[in-house]
Amino acid sequence: KIIARSAALVDVTIDTHASARLSRAARATPRVANRLLKRTRDYAQVHPAPAQHPAKTNVTDEIARKTLALMEIDAEGLEPMDRKILEVIIAKFGGGPVGIQTIAAAVSEENDTVEEMYEPYLMQLGFLERTPRGRVATQRAYAHLGIARPQKSLLG
């Protein structure tokens, strides 16, 4: 609803598939949804759909997909830093557990930024778990990144 309303305010027509794609990538955050819509509108103005009327900007699902690809936002709404956090936990720290300060240092980001901006969304999607010993990448994170999860031995 937010994307449809904002599209009307910025004089853009958007099809339902494009709106749904942008909604999924917006992290359930209106500010992010509006930012993605504006970037998609900009892309559509530079790369109009073939049958687009010259006076009206039309956002199709294909345009939304290409815009998100240029922004390196995947189908789950993960941005480059989200993937970097998961990759660091998996590659450098064996999937965890690892502390937030260590993660933040490894990705060159502030502790609070990782904990308040990235971690909640990764947990909401089921890619990250917070344990008493630290953060742990889930099987879903491994699968999303296309990394085989090592088998734990019975000895540890």
Image (cartoon, helix red, strand yellow):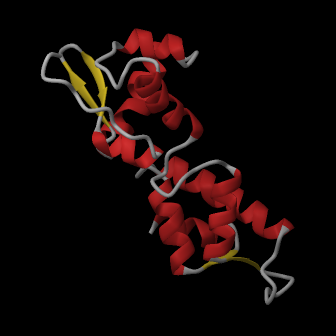
Q: Going by the image, does 118 lie left or right of 154?
A: right
Q: Quadrant of the C terminus?
A: top left
Percent coordinates x, y for residue 23 in the rendering: 47, 62
Query: Which residue appears at 66% of the width and 56% of the height?
Result: 69
Q: Is residue 115 above or below residue 123?
A: above
Q: Going by the image, does 35 lie left or right of 120?
A: right
Percent coordinates x, y for residue 56 in the rendering: 78, 80
Q: Nearer the viewer, residue 81 or 48?
A: 81
Query: Which residue appears at 55% of the width and 42% of the height?
Result: 79
Query: Which residue appears at 39% of the width and 23% of the height?
Result: 115
Q: Is residue 105 above or below residue 122?
A: above
Q: Is residue 28 above or below residue 145?
A: below
**Looking at the image, can residue 95 be seen?**
yes
Number of marks: 0
Percent coordinates x, y for residue 20 in the rendering: 48, 70
Percent coordinates x, y for residue 116 in the rendering: 40, 26
Q: Nearer the viewer, residue 92 or 50?
A: 92
Q: Residue furthest left?
A: 154
Q: Going by the image, does 133 lie left or right of 102?
A: left
Query: Which residue appears at 34% of the width and 26% of the height?
Result: 95
Q: Quadrant of residue 46?
A: bottom right
Q: Nearer the viewer, residue 36 or 103?
A: 103
